[in-house]
Image (cartoon, rainbow, N blue to C red):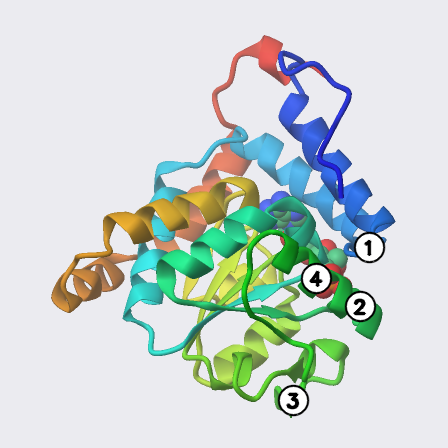
Amino acid sequence: MSDEVEVPEDHPRYQSLLTRHRIEAGVDAGITSRQGLIAEGRGEAFDYLLGEETTESADEAERAAAAYFLLAAHPVISVNGNVAALVPDELVELAAATGADLEVNLFNRTEERVAAIAAHLREHGATEVKGLTADARIPGLSHERAKVDADGICDADVVLVPLEDGDRAEALGAMGKTEVVIDLNPLSRSAQVATVPVIDNVLRAIPRMTEHARDLADASREELESIVEAFDREAALRDAERRIREGATRRTDEREG
Ligand code: PTJ
């Protein structure tokens, strides 16, 4: 899949156009679902209102998420068609930095798309990708996202769920799992039920989590536990909502386009 985009890098909307192109290319390559295009549009609107930057509270959430991952016995990163298209290298790096498994888990599941995403992640350096066996189910879920690997998400104690729908987020919570949710909408059900809601773009959130994990690689359990305990999920959600309602302070010329 090509990441080439014929837009000059100094175009004020370069990042957004590049992102759209990756999602489009993901659809063409059979990785991203067509609904992924709609999800991307929703995400862009929230990102625009958040100022298209990682806020201080999102960064704190990313640090807490990294600490949870390093404390975990079995952390798993759930991969859907949007994140596979947007951040394949970054997902592989985060998995390596935290010892996490990568598992494909799709809302609009087809075996072809699961296989295409797994192959795509391998092309980007992943050695093992779970999600193809799908020999276990998340209780209480009727749709395709219930299908998980017994030695993957089913066995995990900490799961990263980027761009999730609320149903599975709730069901995973009911299984007693710690959930890190990345979603630009602080009011989405998945963000609302997450142990760690990361209100940031996956493009920024995944590499920031990796940086934090590398910074904390030598931290003691006590240090990691104190980061986790100090994290205030309600404050993180409130801060993001306030920023969206009040508007981020940005230069008018950056808002054009
Ligand atoms: O690949 P599949 O079949 O598993 O399908 C994946 C999608 C994303 C299509 C599916 O889960 C879906 O329809 O999701 P929703 O219900 O549209 O929710 C997507 C959420 O992610 C929305 O709250 C968006 O604001 C948010 N979002 C979109 N793009 C980004 C994002 N959050 C962070 N970073 C983004 N780049």
Callouts 4 and 2 close, C-beta under 8 Å:
no
Kind of residue sitting beneath label 2: Asn
The foreground one among 192 and 54 is: 54
Q: Secondary structure at mark 4?
A: helix
Which residue in the protein does label 1 denote?
A: 35
Quick check: marks 4 and 1 in contact, CB under 8 Å?
A: no
First-in-chain label (3 vs 4):
4
What's the CA distance linking mark 3 and mark 4? 30 Å
Which residue is label 4 attached to? 119
Q: Is residue 184 visible?
A: no
Q: Is the C-beta of the residue carrying label 1 under 8 Å from the nearest atom of ligand 1?
A: yes
The image shows a total of numbered marks equal to 4
- Residue at mark 3 to residue at mark 1: CA–CA distance: 24 Å
Q: Horizontally, is 195 left or right of 147 in the view?
A: left
Name of the residue lying farthest toward the top: 253
Label 2 near label 3: C-beta < 8 Å? Answer: no
Local packing at callout 1 (Cα closer than 10 Å; few below 14, some 14-19, many 20+) is few
**Spot occupied by residue 19 in the image (x, y as percentages of width and height):** 68, 35
Q: Which residue is mark 2?
A: 108
Q: In terms of depth relative to the viewer, which is nearer, 3 or 168? A: 3
What amino acid is at disc 3? Gly
On the picture, is 33 further left or further right than 87?
right
Q: Earlier in the sequence, mark 2 or mark 1?
A: 1
Residue visible at 72% across and 44% down in the picture? 40
Residue type pointed to by label 4: Ala
Question: Is disc 2's CB within 8 Å of ligand 1?
Answer: yes
